[in-house]
Image (cartoon, coloured by chain):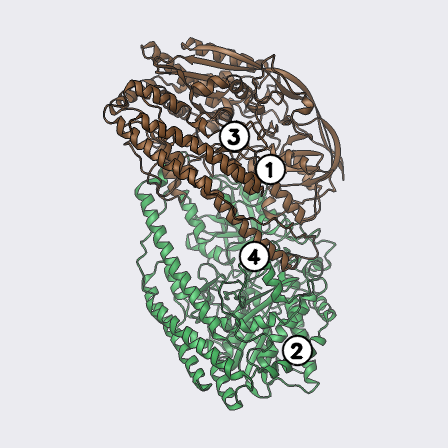
Chain colours: A brown, B green
């Protein structure tokens, strides 16, 4: 996955949140959404037969095989893996092909970082071979540690420590009279997606950006380091992309279109997502001599990490020389696409994907998820050998080049855009997987659907359902007892669902298990079979859990009489987000008034230590009262339309279901329902992102911003954009209400 | 001071808190509480003449002189200092004597701590000499690092890391299946007063306790270490007492009576405040090899410090041998008592004290405060040379032996108990002082009084009043804008006010400046003139601020026509505390119900990682609904009585004041008013502590517990004690209401 799960052992991967008073389940859990009672029994019988065909030993052997060599995009190992995976799908009866794109993928030619004063230290920039890790000595074809889509550069300057390097960190620096113009910024990983750090630094005039893994966030502070324990060692480095993906993911040279050989390409100089300054990730072992050589104000308490030193902000006196040069090659991306045609609705597609490329050996990320997906495909393939066929078409996908920027999935989604918008009923994503708790994020029209799945799979460690275990965890953490479905979290970005959900408007889910075991192998050479089988999921039981969960999602979507969407969950989510944005505006207004009062009374000066530099914060623009009414009215209408449709469907499914002709027309209508929430011209500043409810944040990287058109307008005090997007989002909600009202009418309401 | 101010640079010393809606000032700030308008002008004129006599140079020279040698109780330097200070007071015209007590004061004969396995490491237990610190090489008469009133002992055992070692930390350990029976506990400083750590450990069967200064709380994480910066270095150690002072402070052998030569003494074996197990403070340099040798579960995130290692809980495999032996001598405590008899009310005493003993050189703690107090005395002495005499008697006191357990002040207060209860109108304490913000804690009947003082002294760094600067700081930190007086914080313990306030019931204030500069010299050999003049208060301008503040408090109390108490502030504080206790009971009830629900649904097991040991928490006793009514009724009556008296006084002071005869009778009545809040039999488990509103917490050490009889009963689920103390506190409030109603009648209401 592109994004490092920030939720570690102490805070298991769990994105669902419970809300008080969320609506009780409409149908009993005995009857599956989209099925009749009888159909539900048949479906569960199918799933039992599916489960019988799953074998953890297969996952282990596949993982061992696929992780024996580096497998990043463009590598010989990656190509071998793609061909082998394609061969497996074929053997299981899928109509399989490799689709190839040509994408820009820079790799390092030269990497030099040295402290040049007060004394000269050349950084190692190298992860060690350790005897406990069989592949750590495999150097052939292995990429060194680097950030993909860094600029080339050869610069020298004083260092400023910028904490996580997110915009608010620069406000803190400004309070201390520090700016980064002409400086090299040293940022620690965390607090945002990594690409935000050089982007924010470059906008403020920095000449280079070093990103290191502080042991506080990712090292000995968290637990024993590898190979003794799971966590990142002194010389461990987190690789990763820094392309400006909040603008658009995929090949930087072909925004919006598939990177076929004949595609029109931007010149590299004009590709807006390539970083403007040199950026390099380093280990905490390498960061230490820089931090030790720094002076200036002591960093704010929340900025201090776990190195045994006093964190200073600088600037300097440490000066650093950074020299980076890359080979800017076009390389092939190999996507494996394996289809099983539907018997009833061949033109309705359930797409189930996971990426295949790692940064080095890719054991946890992504192959732990991929080997489970393959087990799903194998079991489904075996079911077809018993004479069963899915009603809808199932498409399994193995994506290449996710790590540098969702390359394989984005190019495929762009290339097949019209077809997917016409046919895809859902995109089901997974990525790295591990021992622990079920995690689900996604489109809220699938919330009820995925709650039913979570209640149908049994956790191997506790014997209760995966859903019950998540609920127990949340209860222990202090959430109020849920009265209905667990709400799922909205999707930002960080894996291959983005082009499907946010560019094409296809209802999507991202599923996985994790939160136990922990680790610090992410994007290092230690993301290996040895590490994963000690600390990730030693028995592969949670790989099987993923297969059961992903398999059920695939099979239920493929088999449902009526597509298993429930829109009340979606309208409730939109109501919550709307409330949040209104509250945000109110809070900003109050905070701004308070700030003006403090400035007017000189409180900042009076509270400051005059022996230190303290600059009062810049006066913020007042927040006017905003007109949310168009959006509130549209949300109310959507609430009514959703409730009416959900109730109508529930009633019609009892006891005999919807007649086939109506069902066919209804499914056709439902297939495009999520797309009604997209806008052809996309979001402000980034037309590629079309979904009006979910987007990665422009300034958070992958952290989700719901209702992004209005939320980010409020955050950035852009009242014109706010007014425009209140109307645009309202129009999107109205389109969805239109569709739901039509659907209700079809059902005879 | 006994207690380390936990409020550092990042959080300046500031104990006042603002409340919304606190009552507006009753009298304008032009008219001083207890004075007529004309009297206020005369008083301010006196204070101007007082200020003119203050000289920062005197403070510097006194500090240099007093810190040239170790000055702990029983040391030759301490005796020399006491005699020199007494001579100064005499020279300034005070009737001065040294009062001597004989108190138990153990000093180390042998200190050995060694890691015996997995490999043998003998700890250094030694602070280094550094060239930048002139007295760091003075070893004659210097005490090594130790905890006073540790038990003798020679033990060996596995180590358990217990975080701060407070009771709730042991609940966390129990969740992980760890107990400390037969073990050596390693606790870090912080989170409570240090004496709680060995007390809690001993109660749970631990055989020894080591307390170290983690660099997270007190070392390089906070700032550059000495001598480069102000903070604690690798081998720096915090000395300090571990006598069980929440039972009673002072000489462990003479509870409740002055430790005169003829006093009846307990055998040492039966003295309940002497610790039951060996305890020793160590540096983080010495703690590191122990922590590095530990295994077992990783410590909870909040328990981890800033050493570059993974914090494990143990037990072991590290085993430690601890051997401690002490000389248990009776030593003389020399209290310097300097009086200036009042002209009008010679039997009404204003007592102003600061301690004189340090753990080593005592520059910041306590002599920075003592040299300011001396400047107050010098200026007052000089005023008498101009013919002025105070109306009331002023008693300046320099206390010996505060560090081991408030020895000098407690023995004096016990010895002179009846006289003090009869005569003292207030006790004004200070202790270590530094650059920064005014801090005030104390009796709420003095809240208005001290707000007026804070509004009459000008901060040298900003030119606004000390009060305005505190308000600015609080505003910047997010407190709502104050509409009236800043509320002062209640007093727990940690300096010499405790015997006066909590044993005798004398209205008390603790005043000081600080919060800028920061440092880590507390109770180490580096609490030196060199450290203080670099990082404490280099210009001594804040020593002068303390003298101006303490001097005003002394002079106004000495000169007021009517003692400057305002009882509405007190009744409002009691209402707040009562609300807090009721809320605490409600929260505990809800939490207990929630815990039972989680236990009943097996949520703790389901949320746990089964590969680790997780024990569900022990089922708590339910919290019944409690009868607060007697206390609420008494508080309501007190509110009425206080409002009536305050209003009556304000009215009578305009324009001509109270007639002398009435004033004399009223002052006699007011003098004992705070004592009405005491109970002869004291608090549950600790009869020495008689005040029913303020006490140090039985299980927090010095952190205050207001309404301790009911608050701690709720915390400990002791419903019988709750019911008893609801009535006892109500009775105390009624006694105060009786007094106020009588005072109102005197004023002709």
Quick one: B276 or A589, which is closer to the camera? A589
Kindly identify which numbered label has been placed on residue B6: 4
Helix, strand or loop under label 3 = loop
Residue A130 spot, x, y in % from top left? 58, 25
Q: Is residue B715 above or below residue A46?
A: below
Q: Which one is in front in this view, the residue at disc 3 or the one at disc 4? A: 3
Q: Can you name the residue that lies furthest to the bottom here? A: B661
Q: Which residue matches tag 3? A: A493
Q: Which residue is mark 1?
A: A214
Say which quarter of the image contains residue B370. bottom right
Contact between labelled residues 3 and 1, with CB atoms less than 8 Å apart:
no
Total numbered labels placed on residues in the image:
4
Subunit that carries the residue with mark 3: A
Q: Could you tell me residue A717's position as x and y percent?
A: 58, 43
Tell me the chain of label 1: A
Residue B47's mark? 2
Q: Quadrant of residue A468?
A: top left
The reply, left or right, for residue B135 in relation to residue A307 is: right
Measuring from the top left, give residue B622's x and y in whole percent.
31, 54
**Residue A41 placement: quadrant:** top left
Whichever of callouts 1 and 3 sits on the residue coming sooner in the sequence is 1
Same subunit under labels 3 and 4?
no
Answer whether residue B273 is visible to the viewer in this image: yes
Please tell me which residue lies in front, A631 or B194.
A631
Q: Is residue B469 above or below residue A234?
A: below
- Disc 2 chain ID: B
Q: Are marks 3 and 2 on the same chain?
A: no
| Contact flag, marks 1 and 2 (Cβ < 8 Å) | no
Residue B358 visible somewhere in the drawing: no
Farthest left residue in view: A655
In the structure shown, which secondary structural element does the residue marked by tag 2 occupy? helix
């Amino acid at each position: 996955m592109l994004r490092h799960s920030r939720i570690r052992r102490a805070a298991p991967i769990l994105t669902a949140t419970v809300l008080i008073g969320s609506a009780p389940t409409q149908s009993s859990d005995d009857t599956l959404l989209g099925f009749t009672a009888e159909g539900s029994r048949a479906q569960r019988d199918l799933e039992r037969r599916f489960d019988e065909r799953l074998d953890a030993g297969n996952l282990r052997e596949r993982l061992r095989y696929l992780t024996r060599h580096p497998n990043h995009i463009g590598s010989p190992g990656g190509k071998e893996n793609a061909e082998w995976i394609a061969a497996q799908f074929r053997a299981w009866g899928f109509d399989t092909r490799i689709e190839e794109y040509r994408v820009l993928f820079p790799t390092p030619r030269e990497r030099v970082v040295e402290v040049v004063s007060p004394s000269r230290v050349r950084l190692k920039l190298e992860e060690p071979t350790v005897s406990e890790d069989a592949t750590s000595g495999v150097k052939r074809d292995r990429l060194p540690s680097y950030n993909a889509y860094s600029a080339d550069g050869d610069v020298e300057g004083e260092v400023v420590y910028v904490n996580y390097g997110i915009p608010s960190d620069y406000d803190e620096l400004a309070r201390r009279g520090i700016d980064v113009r002409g400086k090299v910024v040293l940022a620690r990983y965390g607090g945002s997606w990594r690409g935000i750090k050089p982007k924010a630094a470059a906008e403020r005039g920095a000449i280079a950006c070093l990103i290191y893994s502080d042991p506080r966030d990712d090292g000995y502070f968290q637990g024993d380091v590898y190979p003794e324990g799971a966590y990142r060692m002194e010389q461990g480095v987190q690789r990763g992309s820094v392309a400006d993906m909040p603008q658009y993911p995929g090949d930087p040279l072909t925004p919006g279109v598939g990177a076929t050989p004949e595609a029109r390409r931007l010149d590299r100089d004009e590709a807006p997502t390539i970083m403007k300054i040199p950026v390099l990730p380093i280990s905490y072992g390498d960061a230490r001599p820089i931090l030790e050589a720094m002076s200036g104000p002591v960093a704010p308490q929340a900025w201090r990490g776990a190195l045994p030193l006093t964190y200073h902000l600088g600037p300097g006196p440490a000066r650093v020389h950074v020299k980076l040069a890359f080979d800017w090659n076009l390389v092939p991306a190999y996507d494996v696409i394996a289809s099983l045609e539907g018997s009833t609705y061949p033109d309705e597609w359930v797409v189930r994907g996971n990426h295949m490329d790692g940064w080095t050996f890719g054991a946890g990320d992504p192959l732990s998820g991929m080997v489970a997906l393959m087990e799903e495909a194998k079991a489904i393939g075996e079911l077809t050998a018993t004479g069963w066929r899915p009603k809808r078409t199932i498409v399994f996908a193995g994506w290449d080049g996710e790590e540098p920027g969702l390359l394989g999935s984005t190019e495929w989604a762009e290339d097949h855009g019209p077809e997917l918008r016409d046919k895809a009923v859902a995109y089901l994503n997974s990525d790295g997987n591990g021992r622990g708790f079920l995690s689900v994020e996604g489109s809220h029209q699938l919330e009820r659907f995925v709650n039913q799945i979570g209640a149908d799979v049994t956790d191997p460690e506790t014997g209760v359902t995966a859903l019950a275990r998540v609920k127990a965890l949340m209860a222990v953490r202090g959430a109020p007892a849920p009265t209905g479905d667990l709400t799922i979290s909205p999707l930002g970005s960080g894996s291959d669902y983005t082009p499907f959900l946010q560019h094409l408007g296809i209802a999507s889910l991202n599923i996985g298990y994790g939160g136990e075991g922990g680790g610090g192998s992410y994007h290092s050479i230690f993301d290996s079979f040895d590490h994963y089988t000690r600390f990730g999921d030693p028995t592969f039981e949670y790989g099987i859990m993923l297969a059961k969960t992903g398999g059920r999602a695939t099979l239920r979507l493929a088999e449902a009489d009526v597509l298993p969407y429930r829109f009340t969950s979606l309208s409730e989510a939109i109501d919550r987000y709307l409330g949040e944005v209104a509250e945000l505006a109110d809070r900003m207004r109050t905070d701004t008034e308070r700030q003006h009062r403090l400035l007017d009374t000189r409180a900042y000066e009076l509270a400051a230590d005059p022996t230190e530099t303290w600059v009062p914060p810049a006066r913020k623009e007042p927040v006017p009262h905003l007109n949310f009414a168009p959006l509130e009215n549209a949300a109310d209408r959507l609430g009514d339309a959703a409730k009416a449709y959900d109730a109508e469907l529930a009633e019609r499914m009892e006891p005999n279901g919807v007649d086939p002709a109506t069902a066919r027309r209804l499914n056709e209508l439902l297939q495009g329902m999520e797309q009604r929430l997209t806008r052809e011209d996309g979001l402000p500043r980034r037309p590629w992102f079309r979904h009006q409810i979910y987007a990665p944040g422009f300034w958070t990287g992958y952290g989700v911003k719901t209702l992004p058109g209005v939320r980010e307008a409020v955050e950035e005090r852009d009242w014109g954009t706010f007014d425009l997007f209140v109307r645009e989002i309202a129009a999107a909600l109205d389109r969805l209400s239109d569709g739901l009202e039509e659907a209700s009418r079809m059902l005879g309401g």
